[in-house]
Amino acid sequence: MIAENLARVRKSIPAGVRLVAVSKTQPAQAVREAYAAGQRDFGENYAQEWRDKAAALVDLPELVWHFIGALQTNKVKYLVPPAGGPRVAFVHTVDRLGLAQEISRRAQRTGTPMRVLLEVNVAGEASKSGCAPGELPALARAASELPGLALCGLMCIPPAEGDPRPHFRALRQLRDGLEPRLPELSMGMSADYAAAIAEGSTMVRVGSAIFGARAAQPST
């Protein structure tokens, strides 16, 4: 079923858009099935779940991990181990300078820059993480100057109700107003990734359309 779902989703995604299969709360075996079907990019939301799952899948050499959940500063240590072992390739949810600084500090120890995206709360929802649009230019400037970080794009999650396209469009416009222009826009999930692609998304985060309904949320 996972392989069939992946094939269906891939047919709807144009070349140049990276499909991140959201495997949060899914067992390691589900990741193995998707990997066997050709999927290489996987997204996780919970730092300790990612740590345990990555250790169980260390034998998959081309697996690329994306961290796409809200991140506490004290959980960065799980994503950027000091030496050896699995590590996250992209963090999509940097929303404040203190978090960027902690990732920078730990990434410098590894000798490999961490690719990060800045999460923007485009709709100003109190229930969501993300920096305010007006705070983005200053955060982008500060993050781009930190050693050990490679700032590569922006990310957003639109409101659950209503048309998501204005929010995707707003994120693209924010990105286009930054200097230098960042290449990546992480936007779009199972229910709205087609709209996100139409508005310029370069990374879509698709979970239930690939893996089906999620299991219960683990501890972070």
Image: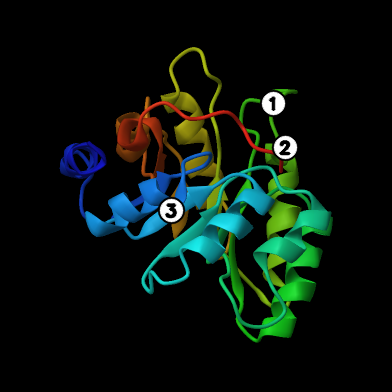
Q: Label 1: how many residues lie within 10 Å, few (<14), some (14-19) or many (20+)? A: some
Q: Which residue is mark 2?
A: 132
Please give the name of the residue rendered at 47% of the width and 13% of the height, measured from the top-left corner. 162
Q: Position of residue 126 (x, y in %)?
A: 75, 23
Is tag 2's residue or tag 3's residue first in the polypeptide sequence? 3
Q: Quadrant of residue 132?
A: top right
Query: Is 14 drawn above or below residue 102 in the view shown?
Result: above
- In the figure, is residue 7 to the left or right of 181? left
> Secondary structure beneath disc 2?
loop
Q: Which residue sits at x=33%, y=30%?
A: 195
Q: Secondary structure at mark 1?
A: loop
Which quarter of the figure is the C terminus placed in? Answer: top right
Is residue 76 visible to the viewer in this orientation of the structure? Answer: yes
Residue identifier under label 3: 42
Mark 2 and mark 1: Cα distance apart in space: 7 Å
Instruction: Say how the picture is coloured.
Output: rainbow
Figure quadrant of residue 143: bottom right
Q: Quadrant of the N terminus?
A: top left
> Which marked residue is nearer to the observer: mark 1 or mark 3?
3
Q: Nearer the viewer, residue 59 or 40?
A: 59
Q: Which mark is residue 124?
A: 1
